[in-house]
Each structure stands twice: as structure tokens, then as C-alpha cells.
Image (spheres, grey):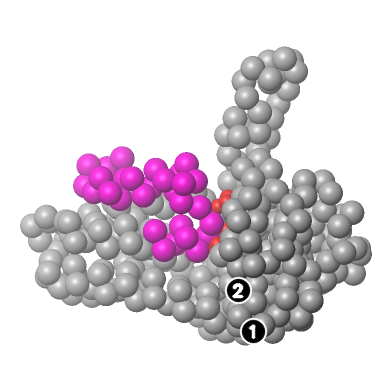
Amino acid sequence: MDDRVHPEVRRTATEIDTMEIRGAATIADAAARALRMQATESDAADAEAFRADLRAAARALHETRPTAVSLPNALRYVLRGMSSTTVEGLRQNVVDSADEFCARLERAQADLGEVGANRLRDGDTIMTHCHSTDALACVEAAVEQGKHIEAVVKETRPRNQGHITAKRLDELGVPVTLIVDSAARRYLNDVDHVLVGADAVAADGSVINKIGTSGLAVNARDRGTPIMVAAQTLKLHPGTMTGHTVDIEMRDTSEVIDDETLAELGNPTVKNPAFDVTPPRYVDAIVTERGQFPPESIVILMRELFGEGTSEPWAEPSSRAEP
Ligand code: RUB
């Protein structure tokens, strides 16, 4: 990693990489805080050196996990705030934009929760996949509205993020039934909504989320169970408006099977994609802090918020691409 990157920023990058920090919104929040740390600790002699330090830190964070678009969106938000021509001015710019970003993220999640809660009725049962703070914000708001909600929670192999969801729901007083992933179809008859988060939402309304989401959505559609995606606008992928695709992270096979067991099986090839793509026709609503949208119309919101494209302000000026 570049020497200019502060040790605390390196630590955040490593924790994102190893998934101690995980989930799209939490990754974005941590990345903004890391840039803030880089700014407050930078001993750059002049404004250009300071900018280069910040770019190096942003690249280190950006290289960790490729799928959650909230990460580049967070980096862009903070770096774009750098308008001063002095080191002290730039430092203050980064602190202000990072603080503003984190506050907006928290507010967006709360506002989104209110919208999502309106879709849930008293007595409803939801089915969850993975662990999404945006999705849980909807349940939390519904519970605060006095609604009784129950949940069927998929464990979400191989990392079992469903366990985190089960714990959080328990803390909210929501009765939980934990199931293995392959039991989902069996229990779809008993639930009123499938409720998931998103790592990215593409311009055509496709939802990129934890591997297994698309199969769950297809089964839910087959059973007539509505599928709701809780995704604050930070999850909208501006690059998809100009034809870019979302990179699906392939993770280490050791998450799926240990070496010894693998050898006993004759060393078959193991694949471990972390995310998949759910086409818009399987999604009933994308719930954001700006209201709920049918997936096909999310591009309108995307254009309003991001214009027609994106830049990569962390790239060195000579190699910077402006797609
Ligand atoms: C997490 C995941 C979550 C989204 C949304 O995957 O797929 O559903 O990131 O989460 P991983 P949030 O565990 O591999 O990071 O709503 O908290 O942003």
C-alpha cells in the first residue's frame, strides 16, 4: 500500500477487505471516516501534496471490495468537497464533507425506514436474506409505529450474515425463525414480504445484493410474495447509466470449504461469488429515502442525483478517466 496512506486508513481498508466492516452502508460510513482521518493526520507541505495523500487513501479504500457502489459514492462525495487552495482549508473541507456524508447517511436510513415501514402491516411476517441495515431500518420503524412484525431469517451461507440479522431483530423484539438457505421456498408460503437490501442498484432497476437474492426473488414471484428492496440512494450506481456493469466480487474458496475437506472430495473446483443480480421484473419496490420506486423508474432518480455520469477523483490526474 502507498506510504502516504495513514495506518488507521490502512486498518480500515483491511477490515473492509476481511469483512470485519461489511454491508454497503457501513462500508461507506467507514470509508468517509477514514478519509477524514487521513485529512486530520496529514502532514503534507502544500495543497497538491495534501490532495495526493487523499487520493492515495481513497485508492487504498476503493481497492478493497468491488461490488458495493456506496464505497466509490462515499469517496467521491468527500473528495469533491475539496475546494480550498491551502492545506488547512482542504483539511477543513474534508472534515466537513465527511461529517456531512455520515450525517446524511444516517438520516437517509431513518427516512427510508419510515417509507418501508408503511408497506408493512401489523401482523406481517417478513423473510430476510443477509444482513442489511437499510432493510432493518424498515422493520425498526414499523415496530416503532406499534406494528407486530415476525421474521423468517435465512442464514446466508457461507458467512452466515443471517445470524447478525437474527440478533438485531431479537433486539427489536421481533420473533425470529432461522432457516437454512435451501428452505426458503418452503417458508415463502408463510411470509407476507421478502425484504432485502442492496449493494448496488443499476440504471435498469436490477438489484445487486448478496448471492442468493435472485433465486429468492424468483421463488417469491412464483409464490406471489412481494419483494421489497431497501436501498438508500447511496446504492444507486451512476456508472450503469453510461453502460458500465457492476463487478461481482469473487471471494476466497476457504469461506466455503476448508482445505482438508476439499482434498477428501478430490479437490473439486469451488466458486464463491459474493453477490448476484436480480432483474427488475422480480422486484416490486425499491424503497429509498426519497420514497418508493418501481425498479424500472429508478433511473429518473439516478439522473437527478448524479447527472449523466461519474468521475474517479481518486485517480492520479494523468490517468484520470471521466466516463
Ligand atoms: C452485504 C449485503 C447487504 C447489502 C446492504 O454483503 O449484501 O444486503 O450490503 O446492506 P456483505 P446495508 O456481507 O458481503 O458485505 O443495507 O447495511 O447497506
Q: Quadrant of ligand 1?
A: bottom right
* Viewer-closest of 237 and 10: 10
Name the residue carrying label 2. Answer: 140
Q: Position of residue 93 (x, y in %)?
A: 23, 73
Residue 145: mark: 1
* Viewer-closest of 165 and 275: 165
Q: Is residue 80 shown left or right of residue 41? A: right
At 66% from the left and 28% from the top, the residue drawn is 257
Q: Amino acid at mark 1?
A: Gln
Neighbor class of circle 2 (other Cα within 10 Å; few <14, some 14-19, many 20+) is many
Classify residue 196 by image quadrant: bottom right
Q: Is residue 116 above or below residue 13?
A: below
Q: Outermost residue toward the left?
A: 45
Q: Position of residue 313 (x, y in %)?
A: 35, 63
Q: Position of residue 54 (x, y in %)?
A: 26, 58
At 70% from the left and 80% from the top, the residue drawn is 147
Residue 243 seen in the figure: no
Q: Earlier in the sequence, mark 1 or mark 2?
A: 2
* Viewer-closest of 49 and 43: 43
Q: Which residues, given as a range, are shown in magenta?
A: 1-30
